Image: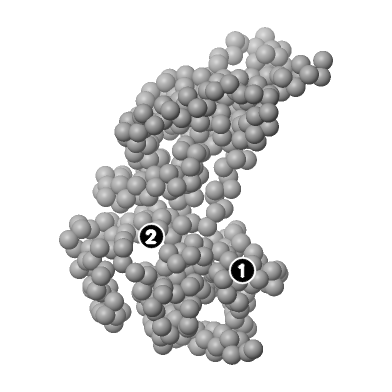
Amino acid sequence: MTNEVHEDELHAYVDGTLPEPRRIEVEAWLAAHPADAARVQAWIGQNQSLHAAFDSVLNEPLPLNLVRATRRPAIPAPFKAMAAMLAMLATGLVGYAIGLGSGEHAPAAPTYLARDAAIAHAVFSPEARHPVEVDAAHAEHLVAWLSKRVGTQLQAPDFGAQGFELLGGRLLTGETGPVAQFMYQDRIERRVTLYVRRAVAGNTTTSFRHATENGVDVFYWIDGDFGYALSGQIGRQAIRQLADAAYLQLATAGAKP
Amino acid sequence: MRVRPDLIKHLPRLRRYARALTGDVNRADDLVQDTLERALAKLDLWQPGSDLRAWLFTLMHNLFVNQIRTKRPQETVMEEAFDEPVSGGQMEALAARDIHTALARLSEEQREVLLLVGLEQFGYAETAQVLGVPTGTVMSRLSRARERMRQMLAGEPAIKLKLVK
């Protein structure tokens, strides 16, 4: 005879937290009590419906304002502006410090490009299972899709000569709209990412700039309406070489009719 | 020097829970942002080695409860709208979003327990810790939430059964 099964144990059965011997006893109880079995079945269905309805949120690109909110230094407000100033000085971009005091409402100047690119690199490059949304096997589709969303004809540079293969890409959201991220990997699984987004109006073409954000080297530049940033932790020189290659290939592609 | 724990890896689950809890993309992400800000401000209060995820959900719960308190009149209006009788023509629309509708019709207390246990897969004791209530309270809310959901979601098949006969 099975001991009387308590209501709480029916829930524990549904949630898979019953110890094995008791689970078998509860199963026997359910076989003999159809009303309880129907309730348990409905509850299991509810758990499944919840996952079906909301698991897709896990795969959504993370809004960059939230990613940024996980990294904001927990320092008193009066020091924030000063910290931003020091960061600007460190990267030799004092000119952009104007207007940064309020933080949130500062324009997405090139420094933000570097920081956002570095954050996006840090978030997705360690991913073992889903580093990219669309893999390189569907490169044509990937480029067409990202081009459409970002609003320009994109190109994934070829880093074969530098030993990096295209892994794929994903679509992110940034302050200036959709962002394309291409990810590359070399033979020892080091990863670099190319981050492309529309530049803020008023920003004009710039030369290469370098920034280090939380140990991630970023080379970035603005070419016409778009900002590009190449990020990785493979040494400054190696990133620079990849950035040179990307710049050359993208400029050449752009010159074509 | 304290090592700052990485909050990013908890972002996707915080967003999923907030989305299900509020039923609204923007409200959910605002709640997540508030949670992160509070987490960074109070990080010194977090015990290294303890469950960071449970702590973050606790912060989110507290913020959510505060929000409900201040927005109560609006919520009540929404509840009434949901309780309007559903005509036959509306059945299809209801079926399409039934899990969302049913969730929205639960009390906040029941919805939180149902989601923490059924979606986020917290244990009963962990859920009690997140919500700051005894485990017995979690069990009774869970039971009521699941039964209420069952009645709401069972509405349509019951009607269909009648039509077949």
In the rendered structure, the answer to whether residue A172 lies left or right of residue A210 reads: right
Q: Nearer the viewer, residue B114 or B82?
A: B82
- Residue at the spot x=36%, y=28% of the render? B73
Chain designation of label 1: A
* Residue farthest along the right direction in this orientation: B165
Kindly indicate the quadrant of the structure image that contains residue A55: top right
- Residue at the spot x=41%, y=83% of the render? A204
Q: Distance between the residues labelled 2 and 1?
A: 26 Å
Residue B29 percent across, percent down from the top left: 43, 48
Chain designation of label 2: A
Q: Is mark 2 on a helix, strand or loop?
A: helix
- Res. A118 mark: none
Residue A200 percent across, percent down from the top left: 41, 73
First-in-chain label (2 vs 1): 2
* Residue farthest along the left direction in this orientation: A78
Question: Mark 2 — residue?
Answer: A68
Kindly indicate the quadrant of the structure image that contains residue A249: bottom right
Indicate whether B10 appears above or below B146.
below
**Which quadrant does the C terminus of chain A fall into?**
bottom right
**Which quadrant does the N terminus of chain A fall into?**
top right
Check disc 2: other Cα within 10 Å, few if <14, some if 14-19, many if 20+.
some
Indicate whether A233 appears above or below A51.
below
Please tell me if label 2 and label 1 are on a single chain: yes
In the rendered structure, the answer to whether residue A190 lies left or right of residue B88 reads: left
Residue A243 seen in the current view: yes
Residue B26 percent across, percent down from the top left: 45, 47
- Res. A148 mark: 1
- Amino acid under disc 1: Lys
